[in-house]
Amino acid sequence: MQEYGKREKILLAGISVFAEKGYQEAKISEIAEKANIANGTIYEYFKNKEELLFSTPELKNKEFCDQLELHLRGINGAFNKFRKYIWWWLYFSEEYPDYAKILLMELRSQRKFREHPAYQKVKKATDILLEIIEEGKKEGSIQKDLDSYLVRHLLMGFVEHVITRWLLKERGYSLVHYTDLITNLVIKAVKEEKP
């Protein structure tokens, strides 16, 4: 079992409390209690509640990207990588619903988050997706004239909508069930038709 330092414990407690209460309603005292530390200790690591919220991706996003890169090793073809990317994102969200909730329902709406260093870590996951799209264009499986960023938005839009809907509902079904449905829709939209 992984041993966490105080900063990591605060981040994990922050994820839990922000997911349960929402950013506006969450209190530093609740996060401190959850982390089993004194209130003032949080301010040794984070200047305020917003800084703590913006830092929450540090732990989970690193895990997401490290494991994603491992999952993609040895997989050939952009569409096979799409399928694995989508599966991993859905699986990870199912495993860590509090983190998914913060990322999609709290941080996405915070304009200032784009200026925080943690945003670059979150962006790394979408940069991996862009690399897969570019690979698909080079191998001739994805239409070369498509804007890679729009293809990325298309895929992310599908996945984020499915996850957000799941987070807002009872979560009584598996997210990974949607892997092939989303993958097949995206492939149909971007596939290079052979003459």
Image (cartoon, rainbow, N blue to C red):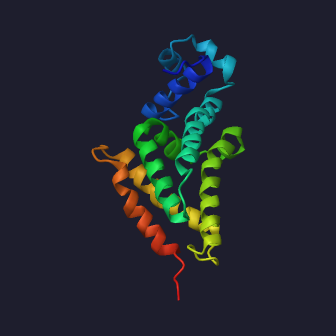
Q: Where residue 194 sits: x, y (%)?
A: 52, 84
Q: Is residue 171 above or below residue 138?
A: above
98 to the left or right of 116: left
Residue at far left of view: 172
Q: Nearer the viewer, residue 149 or 85?
A: 85
Identified at 57% across, 73% down, the residue is 142
Q: Where residue 132 sits: x, y (%)?
A: 60, 61
Residue 152: which quarter of the image? bottom right
Q: Is residue 22 above or below residue 7?
A: below
Answer yes or no: is residue 149 visible.
no
130 to the left or right of 157: right
174 to the left or right of 109: left
167 to the left or right of 103: left
Q: Where residue 5 sits: x, y (%)?
A: 60, 17
Q: Nearer the viewer, residue 52 or 153?
A: 153
Identified at 37% across, 51% down, the residue is 176
Residue at far front of view: 74
Q: Where residue 159 sits: x, y (%)?
A: 46, 56
Answer yes or no: is residue 139 visible.
yes
Identified at 52% across, 26% down, the residue is 12
Label count reads: 0
Q: Nearer the viewer, residue 53 or 85?
A: 85
Identified at 57% across, 67% down, the residue is 151
Residue at far top of view: 38
Q: Is residue 146 above or below residue 88?
A: below
